[in-house]
Amino acid sequence: MDKLYMIIPAYNEEETIREVIREWYPMVVMTGPESRLVVIDDGSQDNTYGVMCTEAYGKPQLIAKHKKNSGHGPTILLGYRYALKKGADYIFQTDSDGQTRAEEFPDFWRMRRHYDLVAGYRKKRQDGLSRIFVTKVLKAVIALCFHVVVTDANTPFRLMEAHSLSEEIRLVPRDYFLTNVLLTVLYTRHGRKIKYVPITFRPRQGGINSINMKRIFRIGQNALRDFRVLNRRIDREGSQKSSQVQKSTGDEGKCTDEQKR
């Protein structure tokens, strides 16, 4: 039976985290007794972690973790690496603000063996025009920097096969803020099998949105700089692999001195 590790980062989500856990926990149980729901508190300043620990009672497949605050990207990156270390076959990620719907997960799970990445496409977003604008700009920047077109690079509703994730995650810098964006780019650049599925994306169900336009602009500036550096790194890695393949191919069909004798 395939083992799923579901990763949910949480920061100051005291108002929503209880319902999010109760909504998603049955999905984890559905996939098998070895699967786990891993909720990671990113140094919240409210009682998010306390609520998580309370909810863990009577839920043997729920793991509540706490860490110092470092942001969404580093938190899910930690979760992905934890899942891989624990031998997960598949890793799913969603957020703790209640914007995604758990009942849409089973369709993703049924497709797991056909794709390296099954990603939710937020076709009709209900979280404000500023977020929609940011998504469109991000899509354009990715096309400019990486020369690939992605449908929804930063979607918080993604199911990844463990082997492909373990290969792509090597190129994600430690503590990188836009972890999911870069992973989507890598999956696309390397020709991984990707399936985009439309999902419901509700307004935030509680708590405070920590991202404002000023912060978005700053993140955008940093992302543009980082993307250029990372693109060169990806190109170098691709060139090295190509050279290795050519060298290996060039050796095929040649008799060794031992064989000639």
Image: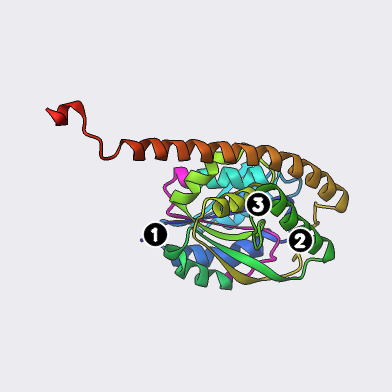
The outermost residue toward the right is 214
Give coordinates of residue 96: x percent, y percent. 67, 58
Counting labels gives 3
Residue 70 visible from this viewpoint:
no
Element class at badge 2: helix
Residue extent of the magenta highlight:
84-102
Decide: few, some or many residues near mark 1? Use Cα within 10 Å; few <14, some 14-19, many ≥20: few
Q: Earlier in the sequence, mark 1 or mark 2?
A: 1
Q: Is residue 88 magenta?
A: yes
Of 241 and 197, nearer the camera is 241
Does residue 237 show up? yes
Label 2, on which residue?
A: 136
Q: CA distance from mark 1 to mark 2?
A: 35 Å
The residue singled out by tag 3 in the image is 147
The earlier-in-sequence mark between 2 and 3 is 2
Tag 1: residue type? Asp
Per the image, the residue denoted by label 1 is 2
Residue 216 at x, y percent in the picture = 82, 50
Q: Nearer the viewer, mark 1 or mark 2?
A: 2
Q: Is residue 254 above or below residue 177?
A: above
Measured as percent of width and height from the top left, residue 154 is found at 67, 56
Residue 66 located left or right of residue 215: left
Q: Secondary structure at mark 3?
A: loop
Of the two numbered discs 2 and 3 in the rendering, the one whose residue sits closer to the viewer: 3
In which quadrant of the rendered image does the N terminus lie?
Answer: bottom left
The amino acid type found where label 2 is placed reads: Lys
